Amino acid sequence: MAYTIAVEGLRKRYGDVQAVDGVSFEVAEGEFFGILGPNGAGKTTTLEIIEGLREADAGELSVLGLPPWPRNPKLLPRIGVQLQASSFFERLTAREQLQTFGSLYGVPAKKADAMLEAVGLDDKADVRVEKLSGGQAQRLSIACALVHDPELLFLDEPTAALDPQARRNLWDVLQKINTEGRTIVLTTHYMDEAEILCDRVAIMDRGTILKLGPPPVLVRGLDAPARISIATGVLAADAARRLPGADEVADDGVSLVISTRDPSAVVAAMAAENALTGVQIRGATLEDVFLDLTGREYRA
Ligand SMILES: Nc1ncnc2c1ncn2[C@@H]1O[C@H](COP(=O)(O)OP(=O)(O)OP(=O)(O)O)[C@@H](O)[C@H]1O
Ligand SMILES: [Mg+2]
């Protein structure tokens, strides 16, 4: 099978820091692939090497069947890159930015307005980039990465500064272009975003991939208990502890939470006692997988 991206044994060191320490993975054509990891895990460095912006110290690398380094002019029109720190041409308006980026690839100027609309910036077309808010600038940089209809799109924390509406709108935009057959590689710190968008995710830390797979498979692999919560007062904690299948019970005065590996038995018993008022059942999420793998301590 020919992969859109194939990376084998990738390494990159900056001085004393081994930023990427033997990373291998493949991305299939049309796949939506996520790279997750704490600050400093090596996500951006990995992306920049694949994008052809940095030279690797070691490793085999193929992007759309071609080596990305030294910077490969055959690849540039076929890939779209949104960098973690966006940069624009000075003193141009949002529309002029898009027209300028587009003109590098022979895209007609009128495409700029369609792209502004796609990212919800149509009313900012005539505003200079330095007057855009952080989130607006981020949306413009995504539009710039998309303006030439690339087959392969790289996004480094595309929704980092976006408000909840803009995030969801952007998810729709990305899902649409992925459904059209384009391959997308993104990094994110939002686990819900990765769970919703990505076919597979790689969880990185300290320059290596700790786990790789579809989010539901990683979550099931954690084998974490389900948590059933009801309003406090609906069922006494002692009664909850006696329910068949209940492992742990906690009541903080607002909610009573039962941890269980047999949620059917617990819910059936609660139903029999007419004690399901305000019930919420939560399984493990990708966030639990992430914290299980990377720990909870704060990283500088
Ligand atoms: N240009 C550079 N020169 C020296 N060290 C660097 C450089 N870029 C990154 N590093 C170091 O390499 C390591 C990996 O950085 P990288 O930017 O790839 O992490 P990241 O996973 O993208 O983090 P974040 O979530 O904060 O964006 C970090 O320890 C960082 O300090
Ligand atoms: Mg980064």
Image: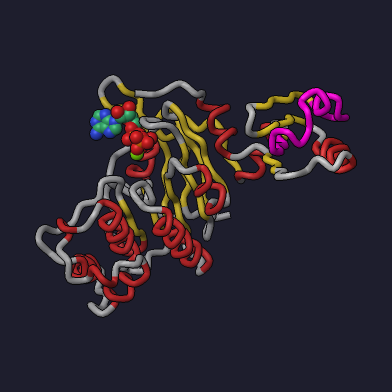
Q: Image quarter for residue 123?
A: bottom left
Residue 218 relative to residue 203: left or right? right
Residue 72 sits inside the magenta stretch: no
Q: Position of residue 248 (x, y in %)?
A: 74, 24
Residue situated in front as seen by the camera: 24 or 167: 167
- In what quadrant does ligand 2 lie? top left
- Kindly identify the residue that appears in the image at 27 percent across and 27 percent down: 14
Q: Residue furthest left?
A: 91
Residue situated in front as seen by the camera: 20 or 99: 99
Residue 234 sits inside the magenta stretch: yes
Q: Quadrant of the C terminus?
A: top left
**Which range is magenta?**
227-246
Residue situated in front as seen by the camera: 125 or 85: 125
Residue situated in front as seen by the camera: 223 or 164: 164
- From this viewpoint, is residue 237 visible? yes
Q: Position of residue 84 (x, y in %)?
A: 30, 46
Q: Quadrant of the N terminus?
A: bottom right
- Kindly identify the residue that appears in the image at 44 percent across and 40 percent down: 189
Number of residue marks: 0
Q: Is residue 96 above or below residue 85?
A: below
- From this viewpoint, is residue 220 visible? no
Residue 201 relative to residue 300: left or right? right
- Kindly identify the residue that appears in the image at 34 percent across and 67 percent down: 120
- Kindly identify the residue that appears in the image at 36 percent across and 52 percent down: 162
Residue 56 relative to residue 60: left or right? left
Q: Is residue 219 above or below residue 179?
A: above
Q: Position of residue 279 (x, y in %)?
A: 72, 43
Q: Is residue 21 above or below residue 270?
A: above
Residue 167 relative to residue 52: left or right? right
